Image (cartoon, helix red, strand yellow):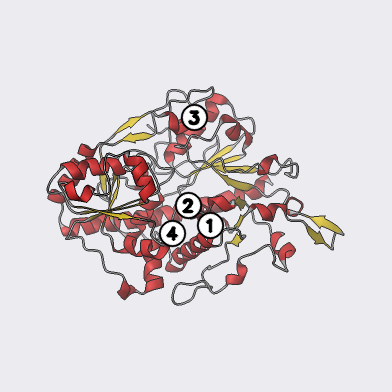
């Protein structure tokens, strides 16, 4: 049970609660321009991996008719002749994103912060480069230019930056944790000034942990929700509407995109499909190496041959536009995750207005909150040492006490029962309504996140 206030509003941060009012039914829609802005930022993040990416890139007013950014000059490279001037434009909060973190997931996290904080993504070189400043008559670096600007770090990927002798003593550290992962230690949390929680389960556990183990820097914990790019909208912008087929809610056919993850419930999904006749077709997309590692011989690439229900395996990583088109066209997404830091692929399915089948465990059931917007698979929660210090099974000192686990122990038979019940009990119209409800909640959560980021900017200004 989450220790949040029993109210239609939610605590934002700190020991003295701040509350917000829920959005009305009239103001939940996010504009097309703002959605495209997120997609353009994400596209730049995953392709131009060693650049400073400012929020202005692809912003409303700088978007072409086929879904392109018309201001590519906003992206900053190390050979920029105006580098000093551009780096000294310090936002309220900066974002550190090293080169190795420019995959789909962390780029989704990063560009959401960049857009709604009106911030920028900084690689290591932007922190270290020395530039001659004629106004002071000497070389300066980022720490001279922005000595009190807070920096967001993702998970444990700090790359030694706050330990640099150049890091100013009073420069705040903001942390975005993925609490299901093992790498964060008590020392990380004790060192930060702000924790940004994308989920209620994160907010609950981090605040409890500080109460139990101490909070030497009086770190503030913000519950912000989060958002992701709308890949379905991006496909229609880039490919044109008539190139993207409309969703067909009358013909149930599931899509499962595992990518390189071992936490998406892929094996349990195949346990269901291979053993049970009469299920709808399943198209499963995965990296072949990750698939083989996960299956350990349980299901080889010939699984389609002996499966009792239709399974189509698709190996290899799709390019971004192909994935966007798949997301736009798919009416039914199978997402039985065992664990998530947030759940971007679930959120992108919400944005696309699909029917989503996922596990009834946090944070997955924070995105699909009821059967009115998707299908929740009943599951038990287990403790797993791989879930780290907040997961209820931490072997070292300072783990969260009396905590439930963070691993959804979903079973193949549970998936099967949920799918069969869904197919038998819903009409085409009901399925379309579920997708529409999921899409509406995506927009509402994005608006919530945007408001939370404005509050974070104001907090950062007050604290500097």
The residue labelled by disc 2 is 449
Left/right placement of residue 253 relative to residue 277 reads right
Residue occupying image coordinates x 40% and y 40%: 7
Q: Is residue 270 above or below residue 145?
A: above
Decide: is 270 above or below 241: above
Packing grade of label 1 (10 A; few <14, some 14-19, many >=20) is many
Frontmost of labels 1 and 3 is 3
Q: Residue at x 85, y 57 (%)?
A: 138
Q: Residue furthest bottom?
A: 65
Write down the residue under mark 4: 229
In the picture, which quadrant includes the N terminus?
A: top left
The answer to whether mark 1 and mark 2 are in CB contact below 8 A is yes
Please state which of the two labelled residues, at mark 2 or mark 4, is closer to the viewer. 4
Whole-number angstrom distance, CA of label 1 to CA of label 4: 13 Å
Cβ atoms at labels 2 and 3 below 8 Å apart: no
Q: Is mark 1 in CB contact (under 8 Å) with mark 4? A: no
Label 2, residues with CA under 10 Å away: few <14, some 14-19, many ≥20: many
Q: Which mark is residue 116?
A: 1
For marks 1 and 3, give the CA distance: 30 Å
Q: Image quarter for residue 117? A: bottom right
Which residue, given by chain and number where applicable, does mark 3 sit on?
A: 389
Q: Under tag 1, what secondary structure? A: helix
Q: Tell me which label, 4 or 3, sits earlier in the chain.
A: 4
Which residue is most to the right? Answer: 137
- Answer with mark 2 or mark 3, whichever residue precedes in sequence: 3
| Number of residues whose C-alpha sits closer than 10 Å to that of mark 4, classed few (under 14), some (14–19) or many (20 or more) | many
Earlier residue among tags 1 and 2: 1
Q: Position of residue 169 (x, y in %)?
A: 74, 40
Mark 3 falls on what kind of element? helix
Across and down, in percent, residue 172 comes to: 66, 43
Q: For residue 235, what is the image quadrant?
A: bottom left
In this rendered view, identify the residue nearer to me: 256 or 110: 256
């Amino acid at each position: 049970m989450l220790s949040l206030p029993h109210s239609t509003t939610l605590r934002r941060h700190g020991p003295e609660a701040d509350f917000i009012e829920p959005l009305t039914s009239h103001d939940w829609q996010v504009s097309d321009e703002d959605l495209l802005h997120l997609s353009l930022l994400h596209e730049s993040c995953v392709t131009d991996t060693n650049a400073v990416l400012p929020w202005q890139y692809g912003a409303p007013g700088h978007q072409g008719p086929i879904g392109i950014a018309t201001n590519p000059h906003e992206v900053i490279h190390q050979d920029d002749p105006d580098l000093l001037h551009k780096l000294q434009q310090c936002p309220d909060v900066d974002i550190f994103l090293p080169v190795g973190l420019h995959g789909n997931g962390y780029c989704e996290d990063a560009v959401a912060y960049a857009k709604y904080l009106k911030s920028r993504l900084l690689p290591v070189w932007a922190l270290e480069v020395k530039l001659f400043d004629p106004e002071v008559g000497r070389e300066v670096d980022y720490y001279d230019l922005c000595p009190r600007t807070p920096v967001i770090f993702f998970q444990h990927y700090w790359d030694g930056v706050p330990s640099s002798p150049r890091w100013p003593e009073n420069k705040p550290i903001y942390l975005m944790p993925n609490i299901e992962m093992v790498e964060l230690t008590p020392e990380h949390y004790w060192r930060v000034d702000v924790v940004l929680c994308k989920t209620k389960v994160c907010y609950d556990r981090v605040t409890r942990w500080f109460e139990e183990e101490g909070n030497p820097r009086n770190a503030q914990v913000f519950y912000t929700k989060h958002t992701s790019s709308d890949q379905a909208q991006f496909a229609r912008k880039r490919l044109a509407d008539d190139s993207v087929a409309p969703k067909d809610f009358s013909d149930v056919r599931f899509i499962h995109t595992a990518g390189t993850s071992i936490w998406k419930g892929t094996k349990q999904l195949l346990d269901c499909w291979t053993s049970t006749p009469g299920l709808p077709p399943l198209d499963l997309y995965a990296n072949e190496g990750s698939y083989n590692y996960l299956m350990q011989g349980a299901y080889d690439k010939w699984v389609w041959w002996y499966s009792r229900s239709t399974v189509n395996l698709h190996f290899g990583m799709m390019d971004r536009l192909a994935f966007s088109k798949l997301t736009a066209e798919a009416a039914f997404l199978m997402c039985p995750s065992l664990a998530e830091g947030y759940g971007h692929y679930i959120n992108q399915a919400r944005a696309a207005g699909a029917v989503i089948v996922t596990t009834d465990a946090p944070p997955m059931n924070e995105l699909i909150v009821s059967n009115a917007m998707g299908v929740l698979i009943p599951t038990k929660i287990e403790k797993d040492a791989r879930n780290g210090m907040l997961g209820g099974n931490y072997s070292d000192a300072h783990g969260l006490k009396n905590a439930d686990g963070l691993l959804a122990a979903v079973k193949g038979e549970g998936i099967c029962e949920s799918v069969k019940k869904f197919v038998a009990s819903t009409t085409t119209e009901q399925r379309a309504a579920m997708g529409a409800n999921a899409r509406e909640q995506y927009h509402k959560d994005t608006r919530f996140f945007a408001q939370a980021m404005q509050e974070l900017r104001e907090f950062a200004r007050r604290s500097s």
